[in-house]
Amino acid sequence: MVRAPHSHCGGQRSESSIAHHKKGVKLPTADLKSQLSNLIKLQEVDSQIYSLGAEKAAKPEELKVIETAFEAKKAALAELDKKLIDLQKQRKDKELELGTKEEAGKKLQSQLFSLKTNKEYQTMLQQIQDAKADASVVEDKILELFDKADAVKAEVEKEKIRLQEEEKFFLSEKKKVDDRIKEIDDKLALLDAERKQAVQNVNPKILSQYERILSSRDGLAIVMVKGNSCGGCNMFVPSQVINLIKMYEHVITCEMCNRMLYIDENA
């Protein structure tokens, strides 16, 4: 393997650096050309595998975002239901309170004509008036609770309809994700079979080097030199390194990203 030097090296220093890195797998020119060609084909397969793998890995998170929004709306509806139940309970409590006050008022009213003095009569009348006033306040509170409960009930009904639509959307998206994951799995199975076939055409030592780079460089191990730039990291590749690539004596790698380099001689 020869590693391409950094662009800041001078001519003599570059040649020294290149000479220093001339080690690793060496094959006859025709064989190395063939190996690089096989690696390029393998990279095409691996690029698809890595791309599909990344897409598959992202799918659960995509679904989780939709599910979280759906669950939040369910929780909001549950809170509205709880609020409605609480208002209804408050109203029933007030209705019981009103019944108690009305009974007390009736009891006072029934005692009114059994009183012997005017003072007792006037005192009882005041108590009856106070009881009626208290009952009126409770009646107003009951009506207020009725209005609040009706408003919340209407909101609950609207939210239930919205939630049904959200559930349909969530289930639809979940099906799309599940279907896509199945498509990816099917495609990955085919690519895996294709890869097993492709690696048989690569020298074991070169394959080992390729796979080390593949795993450390996000699924991209061999790249074309475009102009004078590495196709992986855009690092400048000196002319003398390009000449070394064209000699096909060693596998040349980028000094910056360590990816294998090749030249498209048909370009």
Image (cartoon, rainbow, N blue to C red):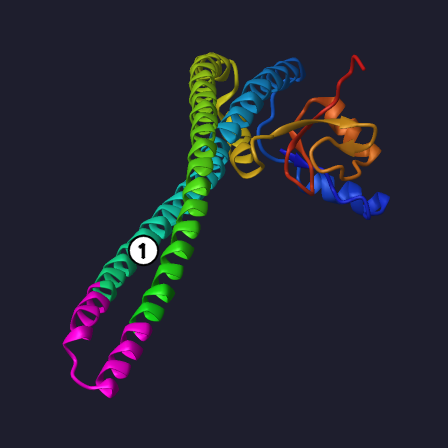
Residue 93 spot, x, y in % from top left: 26, 59
Residue 109 sits above or below residue 163 on the image: below
Q: Which residues are magenta?
A: 103-130
- Closer to us: 18 or 259: 259
- Overall secondary structure of the magenta stretch? helix
Residue 6 spot, x, y in % from top left: 76, 45
**Residue at x 28%, y 73% (from the top left corner):** 128
Look at label 1 and name its amino acid: Arg
Q: In the rendered structure, does residue 168 fall within the stretch colored magenta?
A: no
**Residue at x 71%, y 39% (from the top left corner):** 19
Residue 38 sits above or below residue 220 on the image: above
Task: Give the residue pinned by disc 1.
Answer: 91
**Location of residue 126 (image quadrant):** bottom left
**Residue at x 35%, y 54% (from the top left corner):** 87
| Number of residues whose C-alpha sits closer than 10 Å to that of mark 1, classed few (under 14), some (14–19) or many (20 or more) | many
**Rendered-image quadrant of the C terminus:** top right
**Rendered-image quadrant of the N terminus:** top right
Residue 208 sits above or below residue 135 on the image: above
